[in-house]
């Protein structure tokens, strides 16, 4: 439940454009594979931070970022989660209502709390 709440808070922070809250539960050595380049990933919290302003600008145009489904598997010190999100504008969803952003997250315990160490975002291949 703790990880589910962490990820729900993160989704809300992304949707609302609250950068400090987006970063709050992430490891300093985060590795993220995102939809836009760079294709070899974004490494470290500073590089991760730099990816968000452009996304927030796009989102202010009327895009959504909403959790649809979330599955969490957790051990003592390592966990992963897989989620589907509605991410796009009303026009995107009108033309492809089934389109979902796929999110996979790897977490680890640091100092007694869960932190996100890895994120992978993707969309299905488009025809």
Image: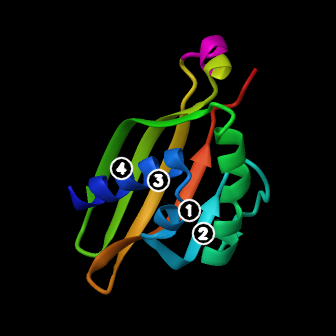
Which of discs 3 and 2 lies nearer the camera? The answer is 3
Q: Image point 70% across, 72% down: which residue?
A: 47
Answer left or right for 46 relative to 66.
right
Count the marks.
Answer: 4
The reply to whether residue 82 is visible in this rendering is yes
Q: CA distance from mark 2 to mark 1?
A: 17 Å
Compared to 46, does 122 lie above or below? above
Which of discs 3 and 4 lies nearer the camera? The answer is 3
Using a 10 Å C-alpha cutoff, classify the residue at mark 1 as few (fewer than 14 neighbours), some (14 to 19) or many (20 or more).
some
Secondary structure, mark 3, is helix
Q: CA distance from mark 1 to mark 3?
A: 7 Å
Relative image position of residue 117 (x, y in whole percent): 49, 71
Using a 10 Å C-alpha cutoff, classify the residue at mark 4 as few (fewer than 14 neighbours), some (14 to 19) or many (20 or more).
some
Q: CA distance from mark 3 to mark 2?
A: 19 Å
Q: Image point 66% across, 76% down: which residue?
A: 46
Answer left or right for 51 relative to 19.
right
Which of discs 2 and 1 lies nearer the camera? The answer is 1
Which residues, given as a range, are shown in magenta? 93-97
Q: Which residue is mark 3?
A: 13
Relative image position of residue 42 (x, y in whole percent): 69, 67
Earlier in the chain: of badge 1 and badge 3, it is: 3
Q: Which residue is mark 1?
A: 19
Secondary structure, mark 2, is strand
Q: Which residue is mark 2?
A: 31
Compared to 81, does 49 lie above or below? below
Q: Which residue is mark 4?
A: 8
Q: CA distance from mark 3 to mark 4?
A: 9 Å
Q: Image point 62% across, 43% down: which residue?
A: 122
Earlier in the chain: of badge 4 and badge 1, it is: 4
Q: CA distance from mark 4 to mark 2?
A: 20 Å
């Amino acid at each position: 439940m703790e990880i589910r709440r962490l990820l729900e808070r993160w989704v809300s922070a992304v949707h609302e454009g609250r950068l400090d809250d987006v970063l709050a539960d992430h490891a300093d050595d985060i590795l993220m594979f995102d939809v836009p380049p760079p294709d070899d990933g974004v490494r470290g919290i500073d590089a991760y931070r730099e990816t968000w302003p452009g996304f927030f600008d796009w989102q202010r145009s009327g895009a959504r970022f909403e959790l649809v489904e979330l599955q969490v598997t957790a051990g003592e010190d390592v966990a992963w989660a897989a989620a589907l999100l509605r991410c796009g504008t009303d026009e995107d969803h009108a033309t492809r209502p089934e389109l979902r952003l796929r999110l996979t997250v790897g977490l680890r315990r640091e100092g007694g709390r869960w932190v996100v160490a890895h994120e992978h975002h993707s969309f299905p291949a488009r025809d």
